[in-house]
């Protein structure tokens, strides 16, 4: 895996030169916007990756929990360039995630009484509450 920052030009575009023509998975992160995950086929035409502000997710808890968020395709939701393991630490009274990409997800948490799954949906410009 290659990781790093690539600056946008004045038109908010970026050009990436792959090592060989093939399909690559890419994560796009930008302050104030929801992360984007996509497959880029570098042997084809240019790819447009629109950015949106996304929604907000709030998890309320009385204690502490550690978990992971998976998307509708059962892939880990990586919300930050700095947290590539997708771990979510939930502490009382709650945890908030801004700029969360719209979609359907499951928060899987490990707590002292066992593992629990919490399905939820995030929509653009709204707050989703989990307890």
Image: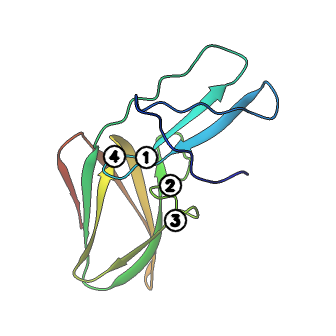
Query: Marks 4/2: CA distance?
Result: 13 Å
Eyeballing the image, is 82 above or below 35? below
Measure the C-alpha gap from mark 3 to mark 2: 9 Å
Q: Earlier in the sequence, mark 2 or mark 1?
A: 1
Q: Which residue is mark 3?
A: 82
Packing grade of label 4 (10 A; few <14, some 14-19, many >=20) is some
Q: Quadrant of residue 108?
A: bottom left
Residue at which label 2 appears: 78
Q: Is residue 39 left or right of residue 51?
A: right
Q: Tag 4's secondary structure?
A: loop
Where does label 4 land, which residue? 33
Q: Residue at x 51, y 44 (%)?
A: 7
Looking at the image, which residue sits at the far left?
Answer: 126
Q: Which residue bears the numbered disc 1? A: 35
Helix, strand, or loop for circle 3?
loop
Q: What residue appears at the point 39 percent right and 29 percent down from the top-left corner?
A: 50
**Which one is nearer the viewer's eye here, 92 or 108?**
92
Residue 104: x %, y % from top left:
37, 42
Between the residue at mark 1 and the residue at mark 4, the CA separation in whole angstroms equals 6 Å
CB under 8 Å between callouts 1 and 4? yes
Query: Comparing marks 4 and 2, which lies closer to the viewer?
Result: 4
Q: Residues within 10 Å of mark 1 (few under 14, many from 20)?
A: many
Q: Are marks 4 and 2 in contact (CB under 8 Å)?
A: no
Q: Please, is residue 60 above or below residue 124 in the view?
A: below
Which label's residue is closer to the chain start, 3 or 1?
1
Q: Position of residue 79 (x, y in %)?
A: 44, 56
Expressed as whole percent of the image width and height from the top left, the position of residue 52 reads 31, 37
* Residue at the limit of the structure toward the right, as seen here: 20
């Amino acid at each position: 895996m290659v990781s790093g920052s690539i600056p946008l030009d004045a038109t908010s575009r970026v050009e990436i030169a792959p090592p060989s023509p093939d399909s690559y998975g890419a994560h796009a992160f930008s302050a104030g916007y929801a992360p984007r995950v996509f497959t880029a086929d570098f042997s084809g035409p240019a790819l447009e990756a629109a950015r949106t502000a996304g929604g907000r997710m709030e998890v309320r808890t009385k204690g502490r929990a550690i978990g992971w968020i998976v998307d509708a395709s059962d892939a880990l939701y990586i919300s930050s360039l700095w947290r590539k393991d997708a771990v979510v630490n939930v502490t009382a009274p709650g945890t908030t995630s801004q700029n969360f990409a719209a979609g359907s997800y499951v928060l899987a948490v490990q707590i002292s009484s066992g593992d629990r799954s919490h399905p939820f949906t995030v929509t653009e410009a709204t707050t989703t509450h989990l307890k």
